[in-house]
Image (spheres, rainbow, N blue to C red):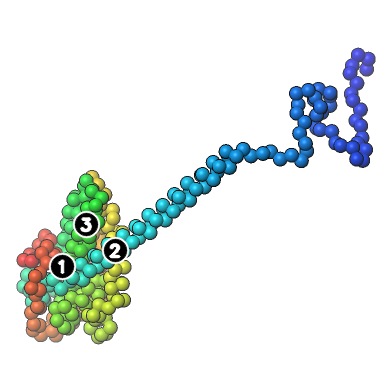
């Protein structure tokens, strides 16, 4: 039309001619336009040296942090193993010092009760005692001092272990399954039962591992390690740990007692068939505070 700008005809590119840049339709927008630098088609954008140095610095910092985490995990594992080994040795050392009441003493303290009723009394008393230990340790950790926390944890585990060992031994008395041997032999047998959470089978000598060999020590150390990690919430501050410790210890003691009692009840010997049993040998230096006494449990120890 007259007065309008005609459109530019498209020109077909012959073979061998360079392609025009997209959008370069006028002399002011083409590659040779003023103010537009010409760039060779095969040129690569150069990376500033500072950017590469920053990347390498970040990589080195990340590697250092990763190595620090690995070192911390390794040291933490070594500390946990050392603590478990220390507590295991203490539990083994304390086992022969745990005072145990024989059947005659128990029947005199709880007259008129049968085996199951007497076992219920013992379990209730031990659960009360371990919950008291948990609450006491939790209260001591109300304002926790990091160096004192391993000591508090070790004190709780050894205290609870002594109370539960006494319970395991007295349950064997109640159901007429006293293991043979000396005080030390019986203590190691009870420790085996506590570690494996089952009653002693007097018909299988392999269950009476009085020598406490390497395998038994490993099992005991594994049990102690589980207790350590399970009892960590007891160290929470502001009296939260006291409540958690009381509940968890009471629950764990009852759970252990029911497992042991289930085994013993299946093999129980009636009291009439026991005859007159000799009194139990008592330790020369008995542990204090492991009486397992609760409401209605008059334990002189």
Q: Residue furthest top?
A: 3
Q: Position of residue 141 (x, y in %)?
A: 21, 50
Determine which of the numbered discs, if any, sits on residue 301 in the image.
none
Instruction: Kindly state the secondary structure of the residue where label 2 is placed.
Output: helix
Q: Earlier in the sequence, mark 3 or mark 2?
A: 2
Q: Which residue is mark 2?
A: 82
Find the distance from the CA under tag 1 to the CA under tag 3. 29 Å
For label 2, the crowd category at 10 Å Cα-Cα, with few meaning under 14, some 14 to 19 and many 20 or more, is few
Mark 3, secondary structure of its residue: helix
Q: Are marks 1 and 2 in contact (CB under 8 Å)?
A: no
Say few, some or many: other residues with alpha carbon within 10 Å of mark 1 (under 14 / 14 to 19 / 20 or more).
Answer: many
State the image coordinates of residue 87 (x, y, percent, origin top left).
24, 65
Name the spot of residue 3 as percent of width and height, x first.
Answer: 91, 14
Instruction: Using a 10 Å C-alpha cutoff, classify the residue at mark 3 as few (fewer than 14 neighbours), some (14 to 19) or many (20 or more).
Output: few
User: Which residue has dot 3 on it?
Assistant: 151
Task: From the image, tell me which residue sits under label 1.
Answer: 122
Residue 172 in sight from this viewpoint: no
């Amino acid at each position: 039309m007259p007065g309008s700008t005609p459109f530019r005809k498209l020109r077909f590119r012959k073979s061998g001619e360079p392609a025009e840049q997209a959008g370069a339709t006028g002399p002011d927008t083409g590659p040779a336009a003023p103010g537009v630098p010409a760039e060779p088609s095969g040129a690569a954008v150069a990376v500033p040296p500072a950017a590469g140095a920053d990347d390498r610095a970040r990589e080195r910092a990340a590697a250092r942090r990763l190595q620090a985490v690995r070192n911390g995990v390794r040291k933490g594992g070594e500390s946990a193993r050392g603590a478990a080994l220390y507590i295991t040795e203490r539990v083994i050392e304390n086992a022969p010092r745990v005072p145990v009441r024989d059947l005659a003493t128990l029947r005199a303290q709880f007259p008129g009760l049968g085996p199951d009723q007497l076992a219920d009394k013992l379990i209730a008393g031990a659960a009360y005692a371990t919950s008291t230990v948990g609450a006491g340790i939790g209260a001591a950790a109300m304002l926790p001092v990091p160096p004192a926390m391993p000591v508090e944890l070790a004190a709780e585990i050894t205290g609870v272990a002594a109370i539960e060992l006494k319970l395991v031994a007295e349950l064997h008395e109640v159901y007429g399954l006293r293991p043979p041997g000396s005080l030390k032999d019986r203590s190691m047998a009870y420790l085996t039962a506590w570690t494996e959470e089952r009653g002693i089978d007097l018909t299988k000598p392999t269950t009476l591992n009085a020598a406490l060999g390497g395998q038994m020590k490993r099992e005991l150390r594994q049990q102690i390690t589980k207790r350590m990690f399970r009892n960590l919430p007891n160290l929470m501050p502001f009296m939260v740990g006291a409540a958690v410790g009381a509940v968890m210890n009471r629950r764990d003691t009852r759970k252990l007692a029911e497992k042991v009692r289930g085994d013993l009840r299946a093999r129980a010997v009636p009291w009439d068939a026991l005859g007159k049993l000799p009194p139990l040998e008592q330790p020369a230096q008995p542990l204090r505070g492991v009486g397992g006494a609760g409401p209605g449990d008059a334990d002189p120890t």
